Structures are given as structure tokens and as C-alpha cells.
Image: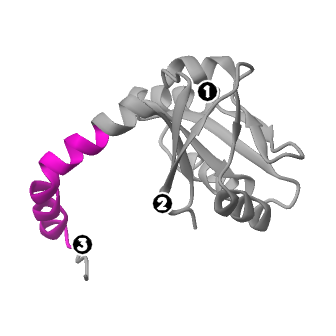
Amino acid sequence: MFRGHAQRTQDPKGRLMLPPEFRDEVFAQSPDGTLMMTNFDDCIAVYPMPEWQVIEQSFSTLNMANRKFRDFHRFFISGAVEVTLDKQGRVLIPPHLRSYAGLQKDIVLAGVGRKFEIWDLERFEAQRRAMQDDFDQVMDDLAENGFELRF
């Protein structure tokens, strides 16, 4: 499980050093260090290979007669690329994903359960501020949908 967040700097080639706890989780799930990256929510979603395989399988249950489903499937899967951690624990972020996520030099890696996300620092901070502003409403919405968060 990926948790927490860490700030990093990408090098001029687009390589990014993962935090040790993220690297450990990657290797626990994908011993060869293989990951899948794709575009999602103005950031890059990164999945260990076993989690990605579950996602790809779940698309087989969608009704592809629905245009919106086809468009989402196309967007999500066609943006995906397989990457492998190098010996230093770095990952090379492909140019199309760096562009999609608006990545500059300063980056945040955010653990969100089964995956982690790669964000441009300014976008991440703006997203967190927006969530803070909406926090109470989101908690109410979750409760209305049967989700009980126990503190």
C-alpha cells in the first residue's frame, strides 16, 4: 500500500528518484521493478504491474457500445506506458506524460493506496487547498453514500 507524499526533483532527462518506502512497495509487488504509468486527473497514476493487470481486466466488463466508456478506455489505456526502475531506484517519465501532468522541476509523489501519483508541485498544492476547502462537504457526501470513516 502506498501512503504519504514526498517532494522530489526530476533531472533534466525526466528521471525521478522514488522515496525508499515507495521503492520497497514496488519491488514487493513487482520484483523486477516494472510499473505502468498513465494519465489521470491532471497527474500521472503509477501502478505496480499486478494492480495494472486488474485494471486492464476490469475494462473487459465495460459495455463498449457506450461512446463515453470507449473514449475513457482509449484515453486511459492509450496513455499508458510500461517503465522499469533503474539500479538507482529512478524511473524515467515519458515526455507525453510529463507534458500531460505539467511537470516542472519540483515534483510530488503521493501515495494513494494501490497506486501512487506523480504531480507537479504547484498543481499538487492547489489540489490540496481545494480539497481542504471542500473537506466538510466531501465528508457529508461520503456519509450519504454509506461510507463511514472511523477516526
Q: Name the residue under label 3.
A: 147
Q: Residue at x 30, y 39 (%)?
A: 127
Residue that appears at 49% across and 25% down = 101
**Of the residues under marks 1 and 3, which one precedes in the sequence?**
1
**Tag 1: amino acid:** Gly
Give, as a single range, the part of the protein colored magenta: 127-147
Which one is closest to the eye, mark 2 or mark 1?
A: 2
Dominant secondary structure, magenta:
helix
Residue 77 among magenta residues? no
Most foreground residue, 75 or 9: 9
At a point 60% along the width and 24% down the height, the residue shown is 97
134 left or right of 67 in image: left
Q: Kindly tell me whether residue 69 is visible in this rendering.
A: no
In the rendered image, residue 52, in percent from the top left (x then y), is placed at: 66, 51
Q: Nearer the viewer, mark 2 or mark 3?
A: 2
Looking at the rendered structure, the secondary structure element under dot 1 is: loop
Amino acid type shown at disc 2: Gly
Q: Which residue carries the number 1 mark?
A: 79
Residue corresponding to mark 2: 4
User: What secondary structure is marked by label 2?
Assistant: loop
Give the mark nearer the N terminus: 2 vs 3: 2
Side (left or right) of 113 relative to 87: left
The picture places residue 42, in percent across and down from the top left corner, at 42, 30
- How far apart marks 2 and 3 lie (CA) works out to 22 Å
Please identify the quadrant where the N terminus is shown. bottom right
